[in-house]
Image: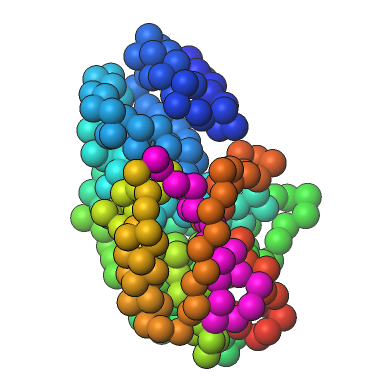
């Protein structure tokens, strides 16, 4: 399988990031594979401290989390190369990835059969329409999963891709149903709408939304030394625009935002039982 340099996602302090950068330069990897949230921490440090891209890295490979547009831009800026994303699940019912020509996800038909199902239980019609990913795996001969509801939401894309592969395409994967904020009128807002890679969050180290009531969210922030009251007002004002006044945001300052046991970073902790509410798309 070649050479691997494994680095912890749990110890990414400023002191550790310097050591990580030194080790990556010494190792001279061709590819970096990481959770998007983990790679973004390293990338932001490199951008803010003027660290040059690693000359041997040809691509950054992201998976196991949703890759947000601001993360893709940040990673491309820091590492100076193409950022690829793939989509799959631990149940092994679906596998899809980007190609060299586009950022659409190519569904591997030999791995599983994928459908996009709407709230009415019927296949969604046409590209750009959001649906739940329902998949049947073709590789599990012991306990196959047939029309398995993944609780992931995605939209189809028109094809074929210019790369020449005649695979079904997903325009984007929005993530799990629990990755959406619920407004006071039960409208769903994807975390894609929250752009971390802008001057709104210039004085923020990290953030996380927490929701347990519709139309209300708690925003946990880790402040940089230069953070002040103007930043609070700016953040609240911009979020109010993005949420169109349908979500009340309360800011709570913290010194640490814990990761999951797998080392993933959650931008939203959603405590609402959306599946039991009948909110499926």
Q: Quadrant of residue 190?
A: bottom left
Q: Position of residue 54 (x, y in %)?
A: 28, 22
Q: Which residues are magenta?
A: 206-225
**Residue at 77% over, 54% down:** 143
Residue in front for this viewpoint, 191 or 210? 210
- Tell me: 46 left or right of 5: left
- Residue closest to the eye, 101 or 278: 278
Q: Position of residue 148 (x, y in %)?
A: 66, 67
| Depth order, front residue of 105/226 | 226
Residue 31, percent from left and from top? 37, 27
Which residue is rendered at x = 72% and y = 81% of the image? Answer: 276
What is the quadrant of residue 200 in the picture?
A: bottom left
- Write the residue at 45% across / 26% down: 14
Residue 251 visible? The answer is: yes
Q: Main secondary structure of the magenta part?
A: strand
At x 38%, y 76%, the residue is: 240
Seen in the picture, residue 190 relative to 263 is either above or below; the reply is below
Is 22 on the left-hand or right-hand side of 153? left
Regarding residue 87, the answer to whether it shows in the image is: no
Farthest residue in the top direction?
26
Location of residue 223 in the rendering, given as x and y in whole percent from the top left corner: 44, 47
Q: Position of 77 compared to 214: left or right? A: left
- Asked if residue 213 is among those painted magenta in the image, a careful observer would answer yes
């Amino acid at each position: 399988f070649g050479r691997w340099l494994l680095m912890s996602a749990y110890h990414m302090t400023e002191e550790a990031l310097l050591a990580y950068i030194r080790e990556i330069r010494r190792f001279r990897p061709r590819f970096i594979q990481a959770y998007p949230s983990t790679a973004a921490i390293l990338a932001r440090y490199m951008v803010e401290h003027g660290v040059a891209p690693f000359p041997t890295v040809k691509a950054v490979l992201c998976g196991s989390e949703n890759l947000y547009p601001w993360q893709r831009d940040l990673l491309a800026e820091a590492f100076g190369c193409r950022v690829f994303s793939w989509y799959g699940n631990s149940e092994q019912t679906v596998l899809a990835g980007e190609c060299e020509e586009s950022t659409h996800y190519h569904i591997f038909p030999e791995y599983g059969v994928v459908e996009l199902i709407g709230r009415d239980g019927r296949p969604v019609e046409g590209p750009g329409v959001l649906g739940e990913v329902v998949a049947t795996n073709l590789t599990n001969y012991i306990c196959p999963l047939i029309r398995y509801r993944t609780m992931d939401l995605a939209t189809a894309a028109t094809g074929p891709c210019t790369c020449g592969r005649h695979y079904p395409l997903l325009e984007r994967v929005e993530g799990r149903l629990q990755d959406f904020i619920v407004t006071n009128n039960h409208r769903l807002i994807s975390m894609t709408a929250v752009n971390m890679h802008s001057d709104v969050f210039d004085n923020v180290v990290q953030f996380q939304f927490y929701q347990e009531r519709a139309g209300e969210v708690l925003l946990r922030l880790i402040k940089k030394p230069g953070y002040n009251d103007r930043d609070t007002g700016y953040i609240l004002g911009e979020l109010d625009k993005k949420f169109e006044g349908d979500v009340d945001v309360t800011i709570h300052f913290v010194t640490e935002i814990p990761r999951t046991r797998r080392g993933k970073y959650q931008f939203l902790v959603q405590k609402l039982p959306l599946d039991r509410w009948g909110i499926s798309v």
